[in-house]
Image: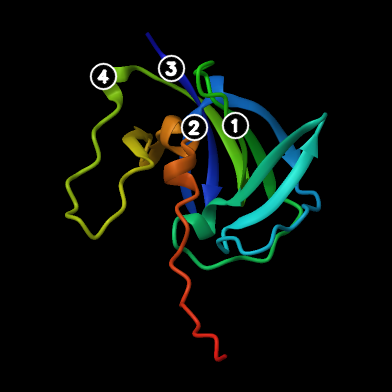
């Protein structure tokens, strides 16, 4: 059975997420910043009474931050698992297309050793001459994996 993916651009590459997890696509709006947070967590928004964390996916993937422009959007993703409801907004450079892929046409990502974080990568699909990286929406909506806090340097307090 074909599965549909919403694709988006991030640093010149095309990524896809399961369209069933896409709640909505929003123009980038201001967020309420939180103290003592990882740099990729931009803050939270109140969307119709639900507080939603907003993550800059480019920064979460270890890439340099980019100035936002009129193509920058926030994709609101929601978990399909009712036992662990999670909603998160991901900031991406631009929305691209909707594609349908047969499970047989999605290839496993190559083994890249321990230095490359594959936890968000579900597989690769090719359309014409380009490769689309399909993200594992369950990992993206997993608080433990998404919000792994960067180690902050410890400061000694002098008495």
Q: Is residue 25 left or right of residue 108?
A: right
Q: Compared with residue 148, is residue 131 higher up or lower down, i.e. above or below?
A: above
Q: CA distance from mark 4 to mark 1?
A: 25 Å
What mark, if any, has residue 17 been given in the picture? 2
Q: Is residue 58 left or right of residue 120?
A: right
Which one is closest to the eye, mark 2 or mark 1?
Answer: 1
Q: Compared with residue 151, is residue 60 higher up or lower down, i.e. above or below?
A: above
What mark, if any, has residue 77 been given in the picture? 1
Identify the residue at image location x=50%, y=82%: 155
For this rendering, which residue is in front, 151 or 11? 151
Image quarter hosting the N terminus? top left
- Residue named by callout 3: 3
Which one is closest to the eye, mark 3 or mark 1?
Answer: 1
Identify the residue at image location x=65%, y=44%: 53
Q: Which of the two discs, 3 and 4, labels the residue nearer the N terminus?
A: 3
Which one is closest to the eye, mark 4 or mark 1?
Answer: 1
Q: Secondary structure at mark 3?
A: strand
Q: Secondary structure at mark 2?
A: strand
- Residue named by callout 4: 104
């Amino acid at each position: 059975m074909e599965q549909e993916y919403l694709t988006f651009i991030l640093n010149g590459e095309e990524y896809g997420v399961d369209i069933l997890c896409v709640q909505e696509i929003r123009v980038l709006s201001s967020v309420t910043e939180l103290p003592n947070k990882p740099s990729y967590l931009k803050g939270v928004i109140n969307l119709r009474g639900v507080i939603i964390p907003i993550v800059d996916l480019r920064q979460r993937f270890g890439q340099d931050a980019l100035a936002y422009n009129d193509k920058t959007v926030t994709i609101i993703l929601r978990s399909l698992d009712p036992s662990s409801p999670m909603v998160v907004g991901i900031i991406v450079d631009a929305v691209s297309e909707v594609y349908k892929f047969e499970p047989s046409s999605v290839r496993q990502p190559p083994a890249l050793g321990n230095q490359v974080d594959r936890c968000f990568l579900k597989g690769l699909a090719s359309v014409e001459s380009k490769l689309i990286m399909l993200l594992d929406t369950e990992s993206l909506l997993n608080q433990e994996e998404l919000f792994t806090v960067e180690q902050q340097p410890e400061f000694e307090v002098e008495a």
